[in-house]
Amino acid sequence: FKGASAWTEKAAKLRQVIADILPIDVHCSQPLAPDALPSSGADCLVSCFCLESVSPDLAAFTRALGHIWKLLRPGGHLLLIGALGESYYFGGPGVRIPVVPLNEAQVCAGLKESGYTIIRLEVYTLPQDMRVGVDDVTGVFFAKARKD
């Protein structure tokens, strides 16, 4: 099976270049301890289905983008993947977790307002047959942005 070895090779390459994985509090103006990163900042930050899940509203989502912007070095990149149109997801039986529902324009505006240059933004609309009832998501966005 050719695909498995390709993924194994990709994983090995990633392990060679990723220095660390750090948990951060995106709602703090200083999300990490001052000495957690090199003084120049991070080369790249990755967030997958996180910021919209931990933000109570659009303003908090945008502030969180600004807080993590401070962690990047000039020229550093943010890779952001998130849900569109989602207002909740089920975290377990009877556990409904609220999510700030975003649209493409709000994601773009939040990134720009927070000081990012959007390099690429892709939006995928979920077809009805892929909506399985654990949330009310209507789509997914993939953003690559840079701190200039």
Image (spheres, rainbow, N blue to C red):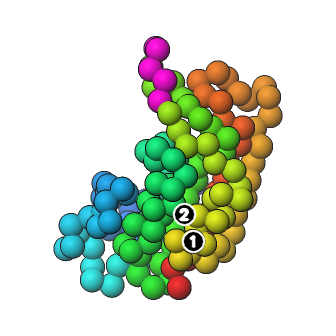
Residue at 71 percent across and 55 percent down: it is 104
Q: Residue at x 66, y 64 (%)?
A: 108
Q: Which residue is mark 2?
A: 79
What secondary structure is marked by label 2? Answer: strand
Residue 56 percent coordinates (x, y) = 46, 44
Q: Disc 1 and disc 2: Cα gap in Å?
A: 17 Å
Is 23 situated above or below 128?
A: below
> Which residues fall within the magenta stretch?
93-97
| Residue 95 on the magenta span | yes
Whether 60 is drawn above or below 86: the answer is below
Above or below, comparing residue 55 to residue 88 in the picture: below
Q: Can you give x and y, in whole percent of width and height, for residue 57 in the image?
A: 51, 47
Given the current orientation, which residue lies at the most extreme top position?
93
Q: Is residue 125 magenta-colored?
A: no
Which amino acid type corresponds to the residue marked 2 in the rendered image?
Leu
Q: Residue at x 58, y 49 (%)?
A: 82
Q: Secondary structure at mark 1?
A: helix
Q: Is residue 146 visible?
A: yes
List the residue tagged with mark 1.
113
